[in-house]
Image (cartoon, rainbow, N blue to C red):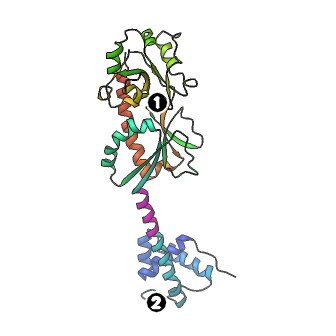
Amino acid sequence: MPHHLPPLAALRALEAAARHGSFTRAAAELNVTQSAISHQIRHLEELWGFELFARNTRPLALTRSGAAVAPIASDFFARLSATLEELRVEETRGALKISALESFTLTWLVPRLNDFRACHPEIDVWISTTDHLVNFATEDVDLAIRLGSGDFPGLYSSLLLREYVFPVCSEQLVNRLGMPTHPADLIRFPLLLRHDEIKDPGWGAWFAAAGVPDLPHDQGSRFPNSNMALQAAIAGQGVALVRSAHVDGGLSTVGLVRLFDVHFPADSAYYLVCPQGAQTRPRVAGFHDWIKAEASRSQQQYDLEMRP
């Protein structure tokens, strides 16, 4: 009949007592009483059917059977400790794999990464950009930054940033067509739209907020995402609706001007998303704390800029 595997506490008592040659010193190391060590050793002897230590000897001596078993226990704890240390180092050093939207990555995240590297030089950030929702079960990604309402079933999510939506165009377009003085003046400006403009209110919501809800807003060049529409605006091709984070570095730096003081809150926000429990892993936690602080500063800036 095979011997049963011992409780971990009993095996630890054996390893410590054999190494120290003393129940007393083993008890002191493990922060238990001497009788607790004696009880654990007796439990092993009853479990295995042989004595581990010769009683009534000074110093405490292992029996032949004990001398055969104790090194195995010592090797087990040494290997376990080394493996756990390797895993700990792996968790605090190495690559942190992030999935994020391209527009947010280029205009908001990338310009701030030097600061993150200064705070966490031990972490390499690997970024992939995609519009699809990450499947953490099948994709090699530690965390994602996504637009949404915060409803990410089965995942941990943390609100990062809420934005405002407003129109911009290039200074060269204003020089060519003149500065519009009323929202209705945009009828003579080319509008830059996204392919999903029908599903996303976009221009319709802005014209409604500006008091000209009947102004046509379905004609113009279309782009697959906001970042491309923004690049077209920078190139002087028309007026684009942008979200706050897309022009976080300042409009003037890219030759853009904001048109009117009319804006509306974006109907979705940026969230940090990861599997439940992953937010406590050292690398993820370090990035989580850093990006939350950065996003808080940006949010204060956006709210101040949009204040009437």
Q: How many marks?
A: 2
Residue at (42% x, 54% y) in the render: 95
Residue 245 location (% of width, % of height): 40, 31
Report the magenta stretch's main SS.
Answer: helix
Describe the element under mark 1 as helix, strand or loop: helix
From the viewer's perspective, is residue 199 above or below residue 41? above
Q: Nearer the viewer, residue 121 or 249?
A: 249
Q: Nearer the viewer, residue 292 or 69?
A: 292
Residue type at tag 1: Ser
Residue type at tag 2: Thr
Q: Which residues are magenta?
A: 81-92
Q: Which mark is residue 226?
A: 1
**Is residue 258 in view?**
yes
**Is residue 162 in view?**
no
Q: Which mark is residue 18?
A: none
Residue at (58% x, 78% y) in the render: 44
Residue at (48% x, 82% y) in the render: 71
Describe the element under mark 2 as helix, strand or loop: loop
Q: For the N terminus, which image quadrant?
A: bottom right
Q: Which residue is mark 2?
A: 57
